[in-house]
Image (cartoon, rainbow, N blue to C red):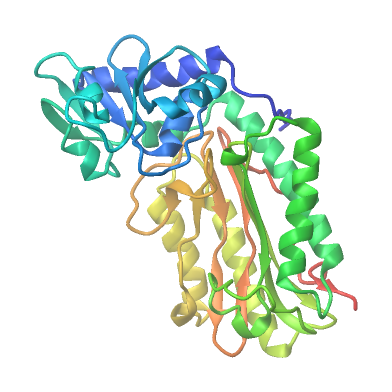
Amino acid sequence: MNIEPIFTSPDVAEMSLRLNRVQAQMNEQGLDYYVAQNPDNVFYLTNFANYVHERPFVLIVPRVGKLTFVVPKLEKPHVNHCKVGEVELVDYFEFPAPEGQTWADRFREQFDPDPTVGIESTCPFQVYKEVPGETVHTDIIDDIRQVKTDYEVSRMKYSGDLAVSGFRVFMQESRPGTTSSHIASSVPGHVMKLALADTPTINPLATKVIAVFQPPQFSDDPHNFTDLNRSMTEGGPHPCIINGVINGYGTEVERTIFLGHVPEDAKKPYEIMMEARAKALELAVPGNSMHDVDEAVNNVMKKAGYGDFLLHRTGHSVGVTGHEAPFLAEGYHREIQPKMFFTIEPGIYIPGVGGFRHSDTIMTTEDGNVNFTPFEDSLEDMTLAI
């Protein structure tokens, strides 16, 4: 599949498409308004990346017509600079504020009498208690984000290409003695240099690239990256990770590498991890249940005797964030559709031996999937000479 990577900002037509999809769901659910406070959902509908602080930013989506965005007066020029499409700004002076001049006063003024209002499951109580009329819990924007538009697909291709380029540097820098702090600086620096060459006006509030690894003695604890002085050692396994968002669109690529040699007790779990990975790629196709995919992948590892060493699901999605729904997870009974994105990352974590995990970002097609972060993954390729 030939997908052209792009790095340009969304245009008015793209933002109108997203709004129309939300309003169509609102009509189906009988909602007069939908209130979004989650900064990722705000970004999705406005292109404004919000720095979350105590001053509320609240987006109001009407069933028909343009968006209304309640914002601090301080941030109004910033919003105007970033927003794409028709967005009416309603500002308030400060938070806290005297009675009659608060953000909530301006917020409540935007609704017709006795409305039916949809609210996100992550809506903070501070906002929820000010919503007038009847409230309905529904995650319309989150659900719509699960299936990407053509524009988003091309942006995700761009992010994936940059991540793969960054991982080439990661591999070149990998040798005994290389520190986490060095990788955390050099690899994101390379990726950011490429991104800035294409987009000098890149939005730092919508950009965060992370590159980390774990030495073997810590790698059975997959989220423990608390010490940047840790160094690579001879042998392995070393799970190596790049993830994040590049100007608003996420990606992830990971590989487990070995330096000089592969310890005997690491060979079998690596092999089983690869079998589980192959099963995930086979089953992550439209029509299948996300629950069924994860169950089948986990069964590969359980049948090989590694059931006690599983710590997480097969994968999650990426989009305007680096970590979002939908999920390849047991208990998540949604059907896979075309143009969904998933990380494929089944892992095995054995205390005293280490962690084994590759991850790629894939997109589902009409009848299969395509890898947006193609990179070598065999044990031979992942064993680096020193």
- Residue 165 lies, in percent from the top left, at 80, 49
Q: Nearer the viewer, residue 19 or 205?
A: 205
Q: How many marks?
A: 0
- For the residue pair 94 and 210, the one nearer the viewer reads as 94
- Residue at 78% x, 31% y is 198
Q: Position of residue 215 (x, y in %)?
A: 68, 79
Q: Is residue 91 above or below residue 187?
A: above
Q: In the displayed structure, does residue 216 sit left or right of residue 73?
A: right
Query: Residue at 51% of width from left, 34% of height from top?
Result: 49
Instruction: Report the residue that reaches farthest toward the top.
Output: 65
Query: Residue 363's spot in the image, x, y percent?
Result: 59, 40
Horizontal relation, residue 228 to residue 176: left or right: left
Residue 252 seen in the current view: yes
How far from the left and from the top, in percent, is residue 302?
47, 76
- Image quadrant occupied by the N terminus: top right
Q: Residue furthest right?
A: 386
207 vs 137, nearest the viewer: 207
Left or right: where does residue 44 sit relative to residue 233?
left
Q: Quadrant of the C terminus?
A: bottom right
Residue name at image x 72 percent, y 68 percent: 181
The answer to whether residue 229 is above or below residue 95 is: below
**Residue 375: in sight, yes or no?**
no
Report the side of 164 relative to 355 (left or right).
Answer: right
User: Quarter-wise, where is residue 32 in the image?
Assistant: top left
Q: Nearer the viewer, residue 175 or 255?
A: 175
Q: Is residue 365 above or below residue 277?
A: above
Residue at the (75%, 45%) spot, across then down: 192
**Residue 189, above or below 274:** above
